[in-house]
Amino acid sequence: MNRRVRSTVQAGRMVTGIMCMMMLFPFTGKTALRIAAGKAGDGPKIVNIVNFIRLLEPRDEKITQDVLYQTVVKQTEIMQQYDLGGTFLLQYDALMDTRYQQLLKSLPREKYEIGAWWELPQPLVEKAGFRWRGRYPWDWHADVGFSTGYTPEEREKLVDVYMADFKAVFGYYPRSVASWFIDAHTLNYMYDKYGIVASANCKDQYGTDGYTLWGGYWNQAYYPSRINSYMPAQHAKNQLPVPIFRMLGSDPIRQYDLHLGARRQGVITLEPVYPRAGGDSTWVHWFMREFVEGASLAFNYTQAGQENSFTWKEMEKGFLIQMPLIAQLRNEGKIRVETLEASGKWFKEKFPVTPATAFTVNNDLPGSDLKTVWFNSRFYRLNLLWENGQLRIRDVHLFDEKLPSIYTTQKATSNECVFLTLPFVDGYLWSKKDHYAGMRFKALVNGKEEIIQGGDPVITEPAAGKLHVSWPLKNIGGSFEMDITEKTMKVQLKGNRQKVNWFLDMTTAGNAALPFRNIRTDRIECESEGLPYAVKAVKGKFSAPGEGIVFRASPRSNVISLDFSNGN
């Protein structure tokens, strides 16, 4: 990312995320994993190869402007070798450099998109008429190098200067504008005045490089609220009709609670610079297999590519692993490789509002039995995690377009920034290393509470926007049949001939700051970020049994059905 290592990779001071990966995956080498076609009924599997370009890297004198330029040259050569189109996004200082102009103009326009990378370096800020407050000509702090650090009026001027100079160079306005985060005012202005069709922001992360985006539409893409670029809108009238794609290809299992209890997360992503993730053949083949084969509903999405700040030396191995594989899957008709602009246009033509999507892992890396599914809709996100035959609801965050972001109207006052949604289950922030928070499936067996044990789940898409999970059980018999839809999650125990007292218990680490204000039989009332919200029990009931259990959801007629739409 911007971020994280770039210079430190080059200098050998690897971030702790990589150290953790070495412990997680003690294997290397090329592994040819069979990748089957996705399930019938699933939407397309879309890959954007996005490389974004900076002119300079002030944190390491060895990373010269020529090193950065040659990195982009190599990226274009490899992509053309495998006939892979993609998107190149230019920071302003790189936009104004004649070498990048000539290189990118030489690429076939029908296959390659040139767009904007919305970090704000000194030349852009000064040309817009403002004083540069950075430590270097490009400064990655949120109050200097990003639009969050400027007033709404200043943001518009910055956009106008960039757009005018981009058009002077390329003859048109950029159609895609991406960054680790862009405030809603800037995105609204870019759409309303310049007609952008796609954007992208950082994957979910907590504290990495000082940037927190937590609880959002996991991976995939969404239409944001007009007053909060991180919050998916529930209604077309309140949404900005520019889809925001989530970048970097997070590991669906490990990224979420990496470095639990630390102030900042590490990174496990498709980025080719990471030698035990996007730079490892086993991990890459595993990730792409699950990406293609797992149930995904409307579509599945991932972003490949890398910023030039990491340098070709550091990304070469991973890039040369990924590009042939992506080309092979494209040739076999298993994925679509397209520009960010093309994906944005397709999304807008296909979906009037944000669709329900999923990312499913049926089989983990060698030596692990973990399985997971992430479900998203415009109302909430949900994560299920299976480990050692047990199921934990690891994450539920609700979305509400009425929750504004402070950055929409105000300047950032810190070198860090935070984007959040509305938590109901948070298996990262509410956990400690000795206790992972979440909702666990339990039952009374011979008068004693036991964690329910089961076999491998079967995850399917029985209808558009509906995910079905069938989990066969061992210690109580039968199966849990789960239907997850745009607004609700329904859990039903079937096939058990004996009456079983089962329930879901929510537990957290003892000192977690929780949003729960009132636990009633039919609803749990919460408040976060100053906004009240609630989860309703459509069928079943809530209680607060105490003794370390925050709340319990119990069935009625063997069914628990929860509504996560918050009345929207």
Image (cartoon, rainbow, N blue to C red):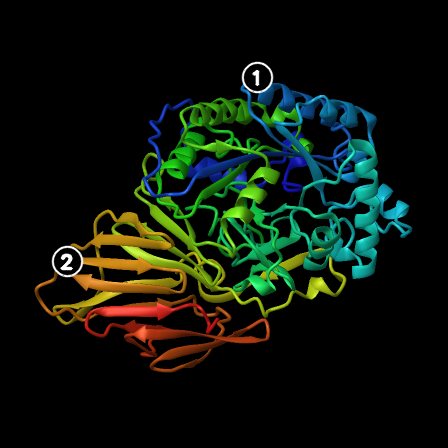
Identify residue for label 2: 478
When asked about the image quadrant of residue 403, the answer is bottom right
Apparent side of residue 217 relative to residue 212 in the rendered image (left or right): left
On the rendered image, what quadrant is the N terminus found in? top right
Residue ID at (16%, 61%): 494
Q: Nearer the viewer, residue 559 or 107?
A: 107
Q: Distance of mark 1 from mark 2, alpha carbons?
A: 53 Å
Tell me the kind of residue under disc 1: Gln
Q: Position of residue 238 (x, y in %)?
A: 60, 64
When asked about the image quadrant of residue 171, the answer is top right
Rendered position, 488 above or below 313: below
Q: Position of residue 11 (x, y in %)?
A: 67, 31
Q: Is residue 156 visible?
A: yes
Task: Assess disc 2: are there few (<14), some (14-19) or many (≥20) residues with their C-alpha within 10 Å of its C-alpha.
Answer: some
Q: Secondary structure at mark 2?
A: loop
Q: Is residue 16 visible?
A: no
Apparent side of residue 154 relative to residue 246 in the rendered image (left or right): right
Q: Nearer the viewer, residue 165 or 475?
A: 165
Residue ID at (34%, 55%): 466
Tell me the kind of residue under disc 2: Gly
Rendered position, 202 above or below 493: above
Image mark for residue 81? 1
Q: Nearer the viewer, residue 377 or 494?
A: 377
Mark 1 in CB contact with mark 2 (< 8 angstroms): no
Hey, which residue is sitting farthest front in the picture?
349
Q: Secondary structure at mark 1?
A: helix
Q: Earlier in the sequence, mark 1 or mark 2?
A: 1
Q: Nearer the viewer, residue 365 or 466?
A: 466
